[in-house]
Amino acid sequence: MFDFNKETENVGGWLTKAEGLSLYNATIKIKSGNVVVEVGSWKGKSTICLGNGSKNRNKVKIFAIDPHIGSSEHQIMFGKVDTFEEFKQNINRAGIAEFVEPIRDTSENVAKNFNQKIEFAFIDGAHEYSFVRLDFRLWFPKIMNGGILAFHDSWHFIGPNLATAILLLTSSKIKNPRLVDTITYFEKVERNSMFDRLKNIGFVIYRTLFGIRGFLRL
């Protein structure tokens, strides 16, 4: 069983235990031959959860994409950063390096020539609406039908909140949304049903109320 606290101890990042376990559990379901894409790795906390899911089940490849210079909010908080060496050290220490392919580049550059069969993508890059929307446009077409797309910080950051809300309310290709703390998951399909769309609307209402309650607790 994956021990989130032990495996991610002293690894910088913003991921709750429930979120980490959900990433692990999503990865152990990925079929052999398919891959996982992570956009935004920071120092590797979420990557360790994904990598352990791979290690403990079907040994699928995790493509961890990050320029490792920090997003705009990281640069505001920390100034100039370079997290790549610390990321690699954390992945090696966790014993998952053979399952993780770090790609030090932008999401946009990598997506241009990426042709692996993606069954699960986790988006946690820059949180401005334009960047979240861009990551969706870049990666959603590459995810197989039946695959899963997940966005971190999806109700307390306006960019991921707005981007995912619009998608859930308008897209005919997503269904079965669920929320794990701040991660919104949904499934890609060829075409959803009217019932699926109603469920998507209901989920947006639920998540909005959940977010209001979360803000009141801050």
Image: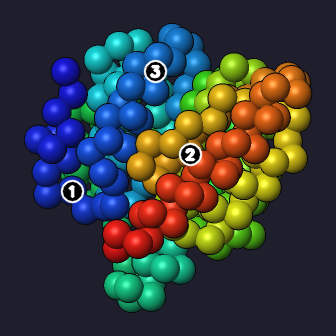
The disc at residue 202 is none
Residue 63 visible at all = yes
Q: Amino acid at mark 3?
A: Val
Q: CA distance from mark 3 to mark 1?
A: 23 Å
Residue 142 visible at all = no
Looking at the rendered image, the disc whose residue lies closer to the viewer, 2 or 3, is 2
152 w.r.t. 2: above or below: below
Does the residue at mark 3 contact the one at mark 1 (Cβ under 8 Å)? Answer: no
Looking at the rendered image, the disc whose residue lies closer to the viewer, 2 or 1, is 2
The disc at residue 60 is 3
- At 78% from the left edge and 28% from the top edge, which residue is drawn? 196
The disc at residue 184 is 2
- At 32% from the left edge and 41% from the top edge, which residue is drawn? 18
Q: Amino acid at mark 1?
A: Val
Q: Nearer the viewer, residue 128 or 141?
A: 128
Residue at which label 1 appears: 11
